[in-house]
Image: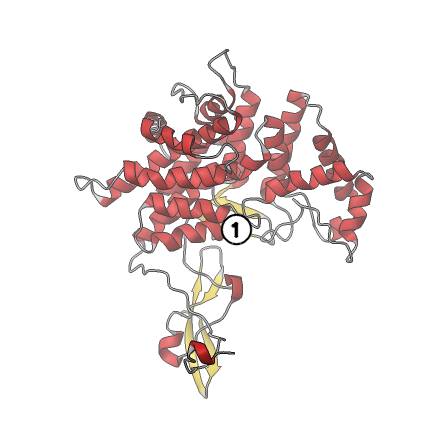
Amino acid sequence: MSEIAELKLAGQTIELPVVIGTENEKGVDVSNLRAKTGYITLDNGYMNTGACTSAITFIDGEKGILRYRGIPIEVLAERSTFLEVAYLLIEGKLPTQAELDYFTNRVRRHTMIHEDIKRFYDGFPRDAHPMAILASVVSSLSTFYQHDDQRSEDEQFSLNAVRLLAKLPTIAAYAYKKSIGQPLMYPQNHMSYCENFLHMMFSTPAEHYEVDPVMTETLNLLLILHADHEQNCSTSTVRMVSSSKASLFAAITAGICALWGPRHGGANEEVIDMLTQMRNEGGGVKKYIDMAKDKNSNFKLMGFGHRVYKNFDPRAKIIKAACDKLLARMKISDPLLDIAKELEEAALKDPYFVERKLYPNVDFYSGIIYKAMGIPTVAFTVMFALGRLPGWIAHSKEYSKEPGNKINRPRQIYIGEPQSEYVSVDKRK
């Protein structure tokens, strides 16, 4: 027998069905509450609201669990590649070798962007934020790849998904090259996905550039760890825009813009900003540990703790090992990286942080890794977007296949002025 919740309201008892997920997550379905009672629910920030059911990603914040399509992130990080994970998220299953080869080759064939798009980069200021460039160029793709009436909706979506996966690294690398005044480097389709991106970022026509395999391996790992994270701000934005039946390019552009904010994708950039502050002001790591514990101080340790994970971030343990491996390989002398390692060690030993389970999260380590790779701080959020793209695509697809899907239209509780008289301008005070 299905579980039922009862709500006593305005002298009547309302029965509300309980929805139970495959991992025993439970939610009260209030879809018909307004129709039955005239009331709505109020949940600022949607902290306790399930906007959808989804089969893509499962998170248990208390236990530190993250799974894509049921597969633990630890397994995928160890055994998979980013494109295989992208296929898993979008198509709902791990590909056979033939399916993976076909998918990979499709992505490779679409890595170049239209030559006319390159002219856009001439119109951006040299100091334009790379997320602004990324959003602008992705939005423009809808003008270059318009709907083809000869293709079915599924075929069109699949092709546009491949185009986005293939072209986003090229668009991002071109934004970086523009900012430093170097020529734009064409993609090399004989290279792997991550190797190709690093080549476009750091090679020049003047000399041969060999992509470090450890950098490629680490980037592949980072992209996998960021590929999806359930109903976060940007993913919810993609689903909301998709609900209007806007194009996939429009929905992904909206996701990029949502990710841009410092409360979401800008967290790893804030880690480097914090380390820079600590270097410039001096005083040693202990000074800042004490400041972070002081309730009267405005200083916050960025990259510690997580809004969802109340115990530990399962991605952080994976990326910490990769971070240590990369730094050992590159033998970089950078005071910020030295401060980061000292801060990590001090926080992990401090009872205040241990008791509150304020461990370094994935943003702490990813910021350090991107800096070690030579990626500018301002472009960190772009790297986040590269990783999150498969998840965005998967959620847009899932929404479009949902039976009886509706345009998203949240309600509100109005707290403004009651009905008022219009006062002529000459009588207003």
Residue 6 or residue 134, whichever sits in front = 134
| Depth order, front residue of 254/427 | 427
| Most distant residue in the front direction | 426
- Which residue is outermost to the top? 207
Q: Can residue 345 be seen in this view?
A: no
* In the image, residue 357 above or below residue 46: above
Q: In this view, does 149 lie to the left or right of 103?
A: left
Q: Which of 360 and 368 is in front in this view?
A: 368
Asked if 92 appears above or below 194 in the picture, the reply is below
Using residue 124 as the reference point, say whether residue 249 is left or right of it.
Answer: left
Residue drawn at 40 percent across, 80 percent down: 37
> Disc 1 designates what residue?
59
Residue at x 45%, y 37% (from the top left corner) = 133
Q: Which colour scheme is used?
A: secondary structure
Neighbour class for label 1 at 10 Å: few (<14), some, many (≥20)?
Answer: some
Q: Splitting the image into 4 quarters, where does residue 53 fall?
A: bottom left
Q: Which residue lies furthest to the left in this view?
A: 150
